[in-house]
Image (spheres, grey):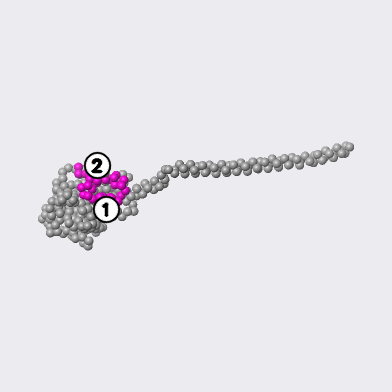
Amino acid sequence: MATKKTNKANVSSKKSPSKKTSTTKKRSTKKKTKKKINRRLSYSSLIIIIIAVFIFFYLGRKDEPDIIEEVNKQDQSIEMTRLDGNELSFYYPTADLSNGGIVEHLAYSLDYNEDHEQADWVFYELTRDEVEKKIAKRKDNFKPDPSATISSALPTDYRKSGYDRGHLCPAADNRWSEEAMDQSFYMSNMSPQHPDLNRKIWSELEEQVRQWAVKNEKVYVATGPLLIDGFKSKIGESGVSVPNYFYKVVADLTGDEIKGIGFIFSNGENNGELKNYAFPIDMIEERTKIDFFYKLDEEIQKQIESEVVIEDWF
């Protein structure tokens, strides 16, 4: 009997480790299953969060303007105001091509009026570099414009008339190039100016424009006679009309604060400071019936043409 008990005990002792191993395996399997479930829940939660964030931003921005698009528009507006990538002709004033035509030279362009034998406007860009380069000297070599599309006045038309051959694009603005200086003496760039205008306040304004070009990196200038309201008389064999008034428009389109200014002078004595003759470009347009910078965005035109802040210029 004692032997049998011993055998039972031995059997019992042999089976016991097997039960422990089985329990351990079950616990391990449960833990692994739990981990898998937790991982699946984590992945599912992450996917749900991502979808929720996407829906929030998509629906939240659906009725709002695209921010990137707005920034791009602003960048394009800045590029336009700084004249990046545009030809000079983009900024020409409106022109009447029925009685002359646009002529382009190295430093300036013009809309010639055959009826009055002078330009309705001369337009040019003046940069800081051009002002600071002083290569060419003035030679006073007045001559007809050789362009085939127009027949300009002659230097002799002004002889003994009492009027100067007044530059519209100044000779002093073209010292940066011998060719530009030479072309500035074409008669298409001249208009009959009384000495009291040409040699005084007009010359003062030309110098001021050069200073603005240096200060602002570059400026754009349109200038000419005001002939729509009539003229004083005609001079020379070509019949050059003598204007009653002259205008000049200047725009700074390169700085952070773009701006514009206009001037009107009588063709004679003009007393007082330059700023006394300053007007908004809109007023110059009304008097001349010429639209300046008309290809620019409407908001930009309004900003530079509707008013003049004298302190921004003087």
Secondary structure state at the residue bearing disc 2:
helix
Whole-percent x, y for residue 125 in the image: 27, 52
* Magenta span main SS: helix
Residue at position x 20%, y 42% in the image: 276
Is residue 2 something that shows in the picture?
yes
Q: Does the magenta portion include 103?
A: no
Whole-percent x, y for residue 236 in the image: 12, 57
Q: Does the magenta portion include 284?
A: yes
Quadrant in the picture for residue 155 = bottom left
Residue at position x 14%, y 48% in the image: 268
The disc at residue 242 is none
Badge 2 is on which residue? Answer: 310
Q: Is 97 or 85 nearer to us in this picture?
A: 97
Instruction: Tell me: residue 115, above or below residue 254.
Output: below
Whole-percent x, y for residue 98 in the image: 22, 57
Residue at position x 56%, y 41% in the image: 45
Neighbourhood count class around disc 2 (C-alpha, 10 Å): few under 14, some 14–19, many 20 upward:
few
Residue farthest to the right, as pictured? 1
Q: How many numbered marks are there?
A: 2
Q: Which label's residue is closer to the chain start, 1 or 2?
A: 1
Disc 1 residue type (three-letter) = Tyr
Is residue 138 something that shows in the picture?
no
Q: Which residues are magenta?
A: 276-305
Find the distance from the CA under tag 1 to the CA under tag 2. 25 Å
Quadrant in the picture for residue 28 = top right
Badge 1 is on which residue? Answer: 92
Q: Is 104 or 311 nearer to us in this picture?
A: 104
Disc 2 residue type (three-letter) = Ile
Neighbourhood count class around disc 1 (C-alpha, 10 Å): few under 14, some 14–19, many 20 upward:
many
Quarter of the C terminus within the rendering: top left
